Image (spheres, grey):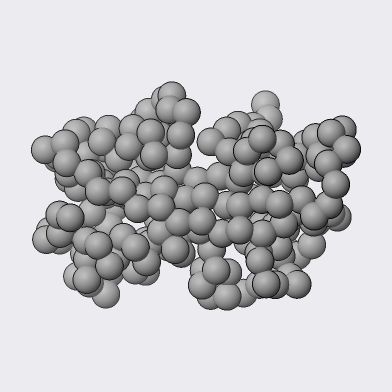
Amino acid sequence: MRRFDGTRLLIATHNAGKLDEFRQIMTPLGITVTSAADHNLPEPPETGTTFIENARIKAHAAAQATGLPALADDSGLEVAALNGAPGVYTADWAETPTGRDFVAAMEKTHAALIARGAPQPWQARFCCTLVLAWPDGHDEVFAGHAAGTLVWPRRGQDGHGYDPMFQPEGETRTFAEMRAEEKNALSHRGAAIARLMQGCFS
């Protein structure tokens, strides 16, 4: 396991919210965080068929382009009754001509479950894979999962993506009905980040 011993880290994302999340974690460690957008990097085509492959594509592209260690994540929702879909294509299910619309994605997912006559509870899990890549081509991989069920109708106003539809195991609320710190303690990304910090930063 390679330790991170630098002071600058590139987060391979154009998502301001994701950047802020990692900045809050890294700044107390004395690490300056920038994003792919800060470096005017294009988003590389995500041609992988797994979360690991797509996270590797993003992390290595950013590291090679800038000479900085780069951290990328790929995440999505796997629904058991849909044979794991949307999975690695979760963001694609939200694509519309005017941008990503996760309300439409949730409605599409619900319609697919009804069309299949899938009995409840609708088992699902969120998956997150983080890849920390160095300019020399080395990388470290960390994965996290959050198991639960899908609910309908949607509940809650907070969170993002599929959060209003996802109720984690052992809870009566969806991710969108929780405060951020509550969700992070249970989430797939929280689990992956904890493994990343223990593996490369502690």
- Residue 33's spot in the image, x, y percent? 27, 57
Viewer can see residue 100:
no
Is residue 47 visible in the rendered image? The answer is yes
On-image quarter of the C terminus: bottom left
In the rendering, at what x and y percent does residue 165 appear?
A: 74, 55
Residue in the image at 66% along x and 35% along y:
83
Q: Tag count in the figure?
A: 0
Relative height, residue 54 to residue 185 (above, below) = above
Residue 166: quadrant of the picture: bottom right
Who's the residue at 55% across and 69% down the image? Answer: 186
**In the shown orientation, is residue 195 left or right of residue 117?**
left
Quadrant of res 64: top left
Splitting the image into 4 quarters, where does residue 201 fall?
A: bottom left
Depth check, front residue: 104 or 193: 193
- Seen from the viewer's position, the closer of residues 121 and 87 is 121
- From the viewer's perspective, is 19 left or right of 184? left
| Residue nearest the observer in this picture, 165 or 116 | 116
Residue displayed at 43% across by 24% down: 47
Q: Is residue 127 left or right of residue 99?
A: left
Q: Position of residue 187 (x, y in %)?
A: 53, 63
Quadrant in which the N terminus is drawn:
bottom left
Q: Position of residue 8 (x, y in %)?
A: 18, 56
Q: Residue at x 85, y 47 (%)?
A: 119
